[in-house]
Amino acid sequence: MSTALIIIGLAGVLSAAAPVIFAAIGETLTERAGVINLSVNGTIILSAMAGFAVAVTTGSTLLGFLMGMVVGALVALVIAFGSITLKQSQVAVGFVLALLARDLAYFLGNPYMGSSGPRLSKLPIPYLSEIPIIGPMFFRQDIMTYFSFLLIILSFVWIFKTRPGLMLQGVGERPAAAFVRGANVNRMRYFYTILGGALVGLAGPTFSLSIKAGWKGTISGLDGIGWIALAITIFGGWNPLRAAFGAYLFALLQWLGLVLQPSLPGIPSQVLQVAPFPLMILTLLLVNIGNTEWVERLLAGLPEKTRHFVAKLLRSLRVSPPASLGVPFEQE
Amino acid sequence: MLNKKSLWTMPVSFWHNIGFQVIAIILALAFTSLILVMAGAPPLLAYKNILEGAFSSSTQISNVLVAWVPLLLATTALLVTFTAGLWNIGIEGQITLGAIFTTGMLRLLLGSDLPPGIIILLGFLAGMLGGALWAFLAGALKAFGGVNEIFGGLGLNFVATALTIYLIFGPWKRPGVGSMSGTVPFPPSFMLPTLSGLRISLWAIAIGIGGLAIIYLLIQGTYFGLRLKAVGRNMRSSFLLGIPTTRYMILSFIICGILAGTAGAIQVTGVYGRLIPSISSGYGFLGLMVAMLIAYRAIWVIPVAFFFAALNIGSIRLPIVLQLDSALSGILQGSLVLFVLMMSGIQQRFFNNKGEKHP
């Protein structure tokens, strides 16, 4: 394969990862506050359909993206109300909404099946796009891909370098302590659930108006991506930089699956497309296994040097969720 | 009579519960009707079509039963993992692996002179093994790898789907070229005998109800069930009380997998007669919805699973008659579960009443 093709392929990987980054970072913000939004898969499909429908009707991609965000925020609002105000299981409410939103998309999207709609155009950045290799990879993308770059940095700085970000961490780790220090825990949880949901809702139109332009109902190829985004949130250890890395890895694997297809004739294409999933389980295993007791016991039996090395390796991979994730906050 | 208590002297909370659930049903119907109006369809006509599609003839009722049996088994399977406090989202993959193992066993026995009854029995046993194996993987990932069962299960679901497609297009493909229509159909002698002219087999119904009965007795009537409930209520204190929690957790996954694998075996031997790409038909996820809706009470599995199966079968004709997508059944089912959860929350929060407990 020529260098030019590889560069085009990698540029495609960067843009294909954009919606996954929106969803995974949105979910990271929500879970940082202590709430799990399990509806991501359905939210992405519904926002893809709604965004596409609005863009087709109005001819404006901007309105399409706004619609996607509104849909994501509304679904998240239901989850926030159900889990924070009504104290129902977040997993239960989220799972129901994952299925309900998907079915709503297929039902209401019926009239828009196969219609042609507007699509984001590439927006090369002057001068920067002329740099060899880097230019065509990073600076000849559409606006949502640029926004995904920006969001990675913004969300990282927000969570780890600002005062409100520290508050957010506190609300997820020790809500009672944050409350004593004057944080309105439940109001912040509402805020971050809805904000995260709006970001997840941005992922849908990024598919239907750019990467997989159009709406094709059940064969739109969107079912499953939301579950991947949730796994990437964990893989990312609730850190936007690591989550973005996971999203790029996922997009890269999918691209490799397509590229390698002709040289592996015995394997149907559908199999290579799901290749990232076993790898996802494996990575989840890697990042979690350091937390288990038997590994610690096993490590204790190893010689000093090996133990140090393995323990260090596992610690560098290990992630632990925000301490209050999924636990409702009871104000005494 | 032993029980003299009439309905009118039931405690107030009983009527409260009923009242809130009736409100939830009305809200779900209102929501679905609103969606129908948005799609430009007359709601009453749509509901009438669903009912006719499900109940207007004995063929249709038997089709509802064909969908009901695997859904019943899936929901029953989930009662076990829910009792242990586990969210077994991997059940879709467990049903699929059951179907794959059943198909594999039946293919092995294609040329044998064993009586058909033994062949089908071996097929079912293989299916149970397949489902149990996949469930064990999810359980082991959780117990020994620290991987949350929701994500391990989801990943395994996708792997199961990929495996199905690989088999259909690869080693098990039809002579010539593989296609999405699945593997070569098995001879009729490999299928569960059906009632004449209908698609439903009394054997399948018996297996479904038998499975529920066994699980009900296991959970309500044995020491194992009691301890499993304790694990589900509070893992930490059960462990401190000396219950081997890891073993119970993995056992509950395996039992769940056996039932899910049975559902997969029924999909092969009682419904499709071969392996197809979406062999689980979504009954695993639908079973999760049924289990949530009935708040994990075993007696309600039979009617609610029947109702959900009827919605699925009844909505098949919507695209033909009203040009509506058949996803409408999913909207009604989903909004029903959502509003029941919400009303139960409202009852607990604003009426200081215990309501139904959802883990």
Image: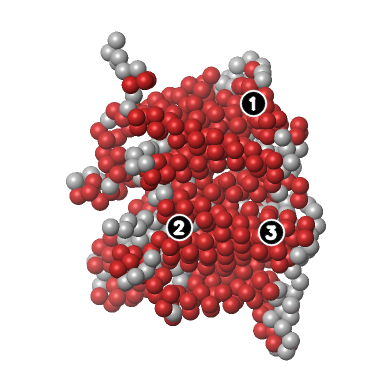
Closer to viewer: mark 2 or mark 3: 3
- Callout 1 secondary element: helix
Callout 3 environment at 10 Å: few (<14), some (14 to 19), or many (20+)? many
Looking at the image, which is closer to me, A241 or B260?
A: A241
Residue A51 numbered mark, or none: 3
Q: Chain of mark 2?
A: A
Q: Disc 1 versus disc 3: distance between alpha carbons?
A: 33 Å
Q: Residues within 10 Å of mark 2 (few under 14, many from 20)?
A: many
Q: Earlier in the sequence, mark 2 or mark 3?
A: 2
Q: Which residue is mark 2?
A: A36
Chain where mark 1 sits: B
Q: Which residue is mark 1?
A: B51
**Quarter of the image holding residue A207?**
bottom right
Residue A22 at x, y = what percent? 58, 67
- On screen, A5 above or below A205? below
B104 lies above or below B157: above
Q: From this viewpoint, which residue is outermost toward the top?
A: B1
